[in-house]
Amino acid sequence: MKKITLLIFAIIFVTGQVFSQKDITISREFKLFTNKNAYGYTKPLFTTLGQSFNTSLMNTAYVVNDWSFGLDISAMGMFIPKDQLTFDAELPNLFGNEAVTDIAYYKDGVLVRNKNVGQSIIQPTIYGNISTPVFASPQNGAYPDSMYKTVTYMEGNDIAFMSGLPVLQLVVGMPTRTQVRLRFLTAPIDESSLYYLNIGVNQNLDRVFELFKENSPQSVSLTAAYAMVTRNAGIDINSLGLGLNYSYKTNLGITFFAGAMFESLTGNFKAVRDTVGSNGKIVDSPFQEIRDGNNLTFDINSFTNYRLTGGFSFEIGPIEFHFDAAYASQPQINFGGTIWFFKPDEFQFKLQPIYPPDLKTNKLNFARELFTPEIPIQTASLTAHKERVFNLNADVKAYGKYQEIEYPLEKIKIEEFASRQMRPLMPYIFFDDNSSEIPQRYIVYNTSNDAQNFKYSSLVGKSTIETYYQMLNIYGKRMADNPNEKIILSGYKSNQGKEKKNKAISKQRAEKIRDYFVNVWKIESSRIKIESGNLPKKASNDKDPLGAEENRRVEIFVDNWETMKPIQLDDTLRKITPEKIILKPTATADRGIANYQMKINNNFATMKDFAGTGSPSGEFVWDFANDPRTPKLKNDLTYYIEVKDKDGSTYATDPKTLKLELLSIEEKRKNATKDTIINVYNLILFDFNKSTLDPTNKRITDIIKSEIPENAIVKVTGYTDMIGKEDYNLKLSTARAKSTADALNFKNTTYTGKGEYELLFDNSSPEGRYYCRTVVVEVRIPVN
Amino acid sequence: MMKIKVIMLMVSLIMLSSCIQDTINKFEHFTVQLPIFFKTDYNSKSVPDTSIDFTNLYEYKEYNDNKGKIDAAEVYQINYRIDSLVLENGLPFDPNEDDLSFDSVSFMLKFARPLPGKSEYSTNPEDFEPDPNSKLYILGKYKNVKVKDYYKTAYNIIQVPEENAFAISEGLRHTPYFYIYSQYSFVTGKYPNEVVFPFVRAKYDLVVRLKVKL
């Protein structure tokens, strides 16, 4: 009989393992259920489960030396310790980054905001209480509102006492004074079977090794147990236990027992995330792993690995009742009874049918989250039929966009500010692949006479990178002005492609720069030392094509600060509001629109026009602030739309006015209105992947520091190039801004990182990338 | 002797069964928190003024998944912020330079009812009207609202008063459609004059707790 039973179990188990392949699926609308959060939330539940495995493995250390056979039914409950009611929940990694989102939460009358929140927040586990919503305010349009917005976590079930897995087990005693307990259960989860198998062996020691006198009421036994819960795709839990037990049987027939056990719970939970939200929308979780649809997977373990058990058992008729309590990860109590069908020399009885309690494993809390809900079907209503009228109509509205905020536009404003600008000079000249010719983007003169006309004032109004392209002339002029100055030119190359075998090219590049200084700027060749090598000392990743580009360069080394210092210029800055002008047209024509044209005019001259065929739709954006003609505006702008239908009829709106408010420096000073001097120090270039200030940068920050008056407001903004992960670059740029702000050590300083979300320069060139690894310090000085 | 054993057995049974019953009761429900996002754009917004926004929880998947099983719904917390403001002079509000405040901004909730012949599942606000039998429940009142403190910040959180939360809870179970009234007071120092802002974008996030029977 026993063999047949075991065989049936084996067949069920093996076939189940082979055929149950369906993955557990979790909707990605569980936007915060990352691996870490799911682990923290469910860990107490799995601990309860694990503890159930090693409960009711023995009622006494004494085992009779003959065959016996019984059925044990037990129920247990665990007291949940306070520290298992909460866990450190993971926050989205861009939460709290002031450039992306401002966050705060309110709990127990206390408000916690932004930086103080950190990267995690205490939230309830499955046994805990109310969760804490984290409110978020997106800061700019680079991140969709739908992603970095308020989030709410799973609530707990407010459970202080939790029932464990009920026990129904076969108990078999053997002549070797060994008692084996076997539990087996199978239940469906998401159309595949879950199997639970638990084997416990209780080996009496005192009789075997004659530790006590014959007929002694004392006994000692060793318990070993193995349990597994598995669902071929999704759940895999293993438990091992090893313990030592002692029991004492009183004259009243009550046996007291105690034991210590080491128990180890290991395992893994895995579910696949569905491809899109079940409502068909794109997944907008703030967690990358959920947006990517990565599997939900986490380890399963318990809080501690030991238990101390004490209890008693007694017999009433054919039933042996037992009650025990244990101190473990979750202190627990356990109660049950063993019905002995056969137990020699003790008693004989009539077999009574026993019905096991209803096993409800599908009540495990995680299971309830895995069901696929019905999607409500929405029906569309028919719009009423309208009579057909041949008409042609159009309208256009203007909107402004300023710092990603869009608003109806009626007025444009140009305000001038006096500004001192500092631009760093990167001492590298980059060359094209396998070429020693100075690339055309660098500005060079053909003759010495031409070079004499170079003036620093020609750099006013230029961008930082346009200034850099004049670097050979800036260095040439500074060397001409300092006749004792000596420089070293070091040529380098990439180790990839054609350059790999072209050993001469490094030197040729350095010589080309030297020749320019000598022939055009009339610098004595003895003042210029040439060096060459393979890869630069601070080489970029040569195997990356972008890195190889950066290694094809000549580096200029100078000892004298006067030659290498940044360019400083007095300039005029213009704050242009709005940054962008957006036209939103509407047009209707019964015969259909053939084409349209929208114009923005200044004094009857068209500054911007949009034209197309068919009906105009959507938005038409003019990058107003970056249009070179904008700073020269003196009059109001007007705009209108003209449409033509397929029958040749035209319709044009009356021009609408965008009033210009122009505030020049002179005007502000003449009218004694409040003004601000805005000094921009676009200066500090960082090494790739570095946020620390090198000695040159420290010297530059000292200069800035000396130019900051007491009433100034300082804003430090960090940037990176586009290489690397977005999140990491955001952190790196923030770290760069912080290093600089710390070095400035000025009270009214704020800092922020933009990462690669705001690239300062074109990253297709090596110098563009280098100049993006920067920090911009803006010093606003109020002037009355 | 037998009496002792029977007493021990009875005590054990009673203790354990009551604990297990408690666990089962607790697991009969679970509670989900549902954030509801309101974004309101106003052109030519005059202040003081009250504006009304309609919400139908049937639009939300979490509500639909569990409707029929919801034992309680509680408005828990509310967060208010200003995302964009164009001043009277036509220029965008600059939190570093402009100083502006409202005496108060209040939020209230009133239940709606579908117009005759309209479905309660409709997401079209035109299909509903304020329920005359519903009270106007105060969710929260922000006083001395300095715009720069509310400008793109997330820390203006109010926990909905318990008595109102419970009162609303009972209504939300059966009437998951309601109006939120946002009441803007005078601009501080401008009383009794009305101020017109060309554009205002305000956002508020409402967290609703839904207690669902398993």
Image (cartoon, grey):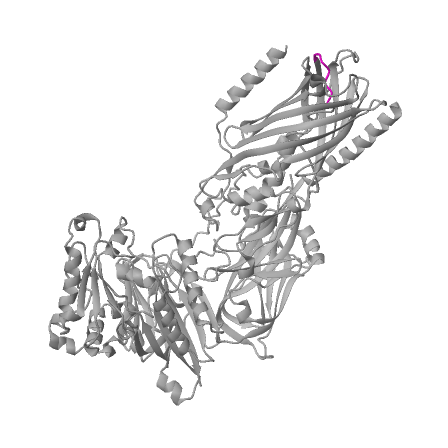
Q: Quadrant of the N terminus of chain A?
A: top right
Which span of residues is magenta-colored?
Answer: A61-67
Residue A395 falls left or right of residue B181: left
The answer to which of A414 and A392 lies nearer the viewer is A414
Is A230 situated left or right of A649 in this image? Answer: right
Relative horizontal placement of residue A767, taking residue A42 as reference (left or right):
left
Could you say which is closer to the camera, residue A240 or residue A382? A240
Q: Quadrant of residue A479?
A: bottom left
Residue at the spot x=43%, y=44% of the render? A292
The majority secondary structure of the magenta stretch comes to loop
The reply, left or right, for residue A498 in relation to residue A263 is left
Q: Residue B130: in sight, yes or no?
A: no
Q: Is residue A751 magenta?
A: no
Instruction: Locate the C terminus of chain A by quadrant.
Output: bottom left
Q: Could you say which quadrant of the image residue B13 lies in?
A: top right
Is A576 rendered above or below residue B6?
A: below
Q: Inspect the magenta stretch and tell me whether residue A65 lies in it.
A: yes
Q: How far across and down, in percent of the image, does residue B9 sit?
A: 82, 28
Q: Position of residue A657 (x, y in %)?
A: 36, 75
Q: Position of residue A712 (x, y in %)?
A: 45, 78
Snapshot quadrant of residue A266? top right
* Residue shown at the point (39%, 59%) measured from the top left: A755
Q: In the picture shown, does residue B166 fall above or below A520?
A: above
Q: In the orientation shown, which residue stands out farthest toward the top?
A: A1
- In the rendered image, residue B53, in percent from the top left (x then y), is placed at 56, 60
